[in-house]
Structures are given as C-alpha cells and as structure tokens.
Image (cartoon, rainbow, N blue to C red):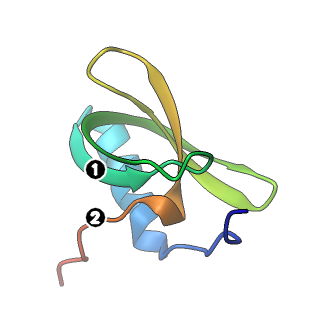
Amino acid sequence: MHKPYQPVPRFYLERLTIAALCNETMNLHWQDEVTDMHYIAQLLPVDTTEENATEYLIAHNEQGETLKIRLDLIHNFPTPVK
C-alpha cells in the first residue's frame, strides 16, 4: 500500500508550469506510484493535473511516451532561488 499524498510546495507547480510553457526539459528522479520503482530521465513537462486530491505531472519522455507522475514522488525538485 502506498503512503497518502503529501501536498508539495506551490513553487513546484510554478516551476513545472514555466518548464511546460517554455518547452524546457527537466532531468527528474521519481518513484513510480504503483511499482515503487525509481526512475531518472529527461522529461518534457506538459501539464499538471489533480485527481482525487492528488497532484500529478503529465510529461513526455525521450521516446515520446506520456507519463503521469505523482508530484510528491519526485525526489529532485530544485529549491527556489531568492
């Protein structure tokens, strides 16, 4: 069983939105919600979505496949710069 969703800081959503608008790829490390497998890949963020009070990143990988990644399972978000 997977742990409950933990809301992420709002700057995560802002950063992903900027990346999607600018067609910026991101090298992300995440854990699969179902299998618990860890992945590291270059992704192109497309959008964020919310389902059942859980936020997800919609992204394309280098092969053009669409991925849906639970935001709290992304392990390497950059910290905000002030």
Name which residue type carries label 2: Asn
Reading the chain from its start, which is encountered first: label 2 or label 1?
A: 1
The image shows residue 19 at horizontal and vertical percentages of: 30, 44
In the image, taking residue 57 as reference, residue 60 lies left or right, namely left
Residue at left offset 71%, top offset 71% = 4
Q: Quadrant of the C terminus?
A: bottom left
In the image, taking residue 47 as reference, residue 17 lies left or right, namely left
Disc 2 is placed on an element classified as loop
- Crowd rating for badge 1 (residues with CA inside 10 Å; few <14, some 14–19, many 20+): some
Residue at left offset 60%, top offset 74% = 7
Residue at left offset 41%, top offset 49% = 17
- Residue that numbered label 1 is attached to: 28
Q: Nearer the viewer, residue 51 or 20?
A: 51
When the figure is inspected, residue 7 is found, relative to residue 1, above or below; the finding is below
In the image, taking residue 19 as reference, residue 81 lies left or right, namely left
The image shows residue 39 at horizontal and vertical percentages of: 33, 45
Picture mark count? 2
Q: Nearer the viewer, residue 16 or 54?
A: 54
Which mark is on residue 76?
A: 2
View extreme (bottom): residue? 82
The quadrant in which residue 63 appears is: top left
Disc 2 and disc 1: Cα gap in Å? 6 Å
Disc 1 is placed on an element classified as strand
Which mark is on residue 39?
A: none
Instruction: Check whether the beta carbons of the residues at disc 2 and disc 1 lie within 8 A of each other.
Output: yes
- Crowd rating for badge 2 (residues with CA inside 10 Å; few <14, some 14–19, many 20+): few
Name which residue type carries label 1: Leu
Q: Quadrant of the N terminus?
A: bottom right
The image shows residue 43 at horizontal and vertical percentages of: 29, 35
View extreme (right): residue? 52
